[in-house]
């Protein structure tokens, strides 16, 4: 691996799989160090913003016509609609969960 990861945290180095070119994997959630800067680079992934979400995000899709509109789904059947232009890039730990809309009635994956 050489000096390829010299500027990254030790955690990111140990969780990066060169062969698959991916960071993390099953069971490694929450192992990367957190940051409060405007952008954070972990492995080959750059975190540009976060939103307060109920549970983990299992699926996220953006609207092709407006990339600020994002739909997310977690472990619950609800789909949450977000206009990320109305949220801070990195919310405070005590900020409320507040999507712009909630779609209910979904019973299947997808």
Image (spheres, helix red, strand yellow):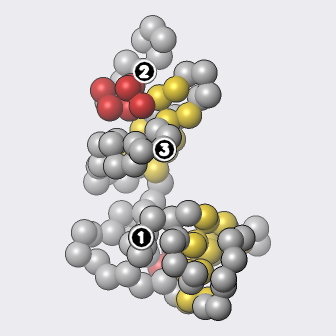
Q: Position of residue 70 (x, y in %)?
A: 61, 72
Task: Report the side of 100 relative to 60 (left or right).
Answer: left
Which residue corresponds to mark 2?
Answer: 5
Considering only order in the chain, which callout, 2 or 3, is on the residue closer to the N terminus?
A: 2
Considering only order in the chain, which callout, 2 or 1, is on the residue closer to the N terminus?
A: 2
Q: Secondary structure at mark 2?
A: loop
- Location of residue 36 with respect to 32 vertically, above or below: below
Pick whichever, 50 or 107, lies toward us. Answer: 107
Image point 40% across, 42% down: which residue?
28
Q: Are dots 1 and 3 in contact, CB under 8 Å?
A: no
Q: Position of residue 85 (x, y in %)?
A: 52, 74
Pick whichever, 99 or 74, lies toward us. Answer: 74
Which residue corresponds to mark 3?
Answer: 26
Image point 46% across, 50% down: which residue?
47
**Mark linked to residue 3:** none
Quarter occupied by the C terminus:
bottom right
Image point 76% across, 72% down: which residue?
65
Task: Report the side of 47 relative to 20 (left or right).
Answer: left
**Which residue ends up furthest to the left in the rendered image?**
94
């Amino acid at each position: 691996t050489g000096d390829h990861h010299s500027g990254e945290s030790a955690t990111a180095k140990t969780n990066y799989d060169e062969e698959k070119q991916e960071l993390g994997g099953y069971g490694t959630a929450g192992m990367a160090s957190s940051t409060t800067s405007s952008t954070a680079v972990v492995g080959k992934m750059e975190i540009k913003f976060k939103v307060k979400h109920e549970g983990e995000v299992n699926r996220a899709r953006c609207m092709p016509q407006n990339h600020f509109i994002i739909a997310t789904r977690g472990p619950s059947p609800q789909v949450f609609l977000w206009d990320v232009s109305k949220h801070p890039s990195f919310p405070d730990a005590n900020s409320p969960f507040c999507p712009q809309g909630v779609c209910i009635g979904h019973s299947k994956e997808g």
